[in-house]
Image (tube, helix red, strand yellow):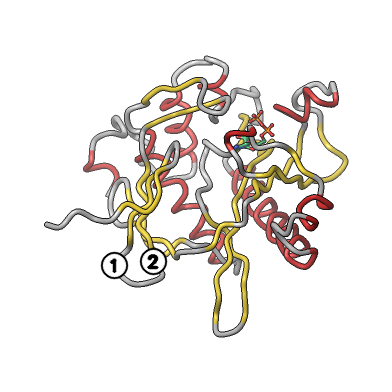
Amino acid sequence: MARRKLVYEGKAKILYEGPEPGTLVQYFKDDATAFNAEKKDVIDGKGVLNNRLSEFFMTGLQRIGVPTHFIKRLNMREQLIRQVEIVPLEVIVRNFAAGTMAQRLGLEEGTALPRPIVEFSYKDDSLGDPLVPEEYIIAFGWATQQDLDDIVALALRVNDFMAGVMHGVGIKLVDFKIEVGRVWENDFMRLIVADEISPDSCRLWDIETDRKLDKDVFRRDLGDLNDAYTEVARRLGVLPKSGQPITKPTLIN
Ligand code: CDP
């Protein structure tokens, strides 16, 4: 079998050329990185869980009319996606203060924000993805004002959906990051949700106990990352409640 053409390798995922023009295959690795890849590890089975969880969130979003790049899951670690032109921004939505926002403003983590806050970082690992104001984004031509209005609207719809789904299984959506891509349909450009939505890119706290069920478990050495992600997957019905180890292929299909 001919080797597929690698299009891009990132920290947690690899993109290969897809079977049709305009498609890609997104492969989820087991690699975990934090603090701009200063902290690294391989967590067996993480890619399998994130592939499933991202499929779950993206298909749910599509069902309520939010466009995403997801086409279908191909196997345990791969999904077919639409090729997009990634907008070079990390779009962060926050419902409660945590992480860099809590540090920057001296807020206690978990403080409820007066309303969801959307912020943007410029996607550049060598710079550590710096926070940027809209003014910079427009001036440097990374997106137009119209794009930003559309991106904020998209991000808030994702927030409402994710917060509701998570609340339904006893999890608080503290914050999350999405990436947005451009697709052209005839002469029209549309912005759609791209990349992944998984516990790697969200902060998820148990509503009762504030137990962390996201990548902070890895960043802050709070225990077993797979246990946390498996708990999220089980609560959402993405893995059977009875649960065997998630690395067993039979469970995932
Ligand atoms: O995660 P960190 O404290 O470095 O930054 P943050 O700005 O507080 O992150 C806000 C949310 O975006 C968290 O849920 C992060 O997991 C997510 N994020 C991400 O997925 N990728 C990044 N490069 C930066 C943030």
Q: Name the foreground residue: 104 vs 75.
A: 104
At horizontal 48% and vertical 16% (from top left) the residue drawn is 223
Counting every numbered tag in the picture gives 2
In the figure, residue 122 lies in which quadrant?
A: top right
**Ligand 1, what quadrant?**
top right
At horizontal 37% and vertical 43% (from top left) the residue drawn is 28
At horizontal 32% and vertical 46% (from top left) the residue drawn is 77
At horizontal 32% and vertical 63% (from top left) the residue drawn is 18
Q: Which residue is mark 1?
A: 19
In whole angstroms, how far apart are the C-alphas of marks 2 and 1?
7 Å
Disc 1 marks which amino acid? Pro
Q: Secondary structure at mark 2?
A: strand
Tell me whether the residue at label 2 lies in contact with that at label 1, contact meaning CB atoms closer than 8 angstroms. Answer: yes
In the rendered image, residue 192, in percent from the top left (x then y), is placed at 59, 64
Marking on residue 199: none
User: Does the closest atom of ligand 1 sit within 8 Å of the Cβ of label 1?
Assistant: no
Q: Which residue is mark 2?
A: 23
Specify whether 121 is left or right of 14: right
Specify whether 174 is left or right of 136: left
In the rendered image, residue 90, in percent from the top left (x then y), is placed at 64, 46
In the rendered image, residue 74, in percent from the top left (x then y), is placed at 30, 57
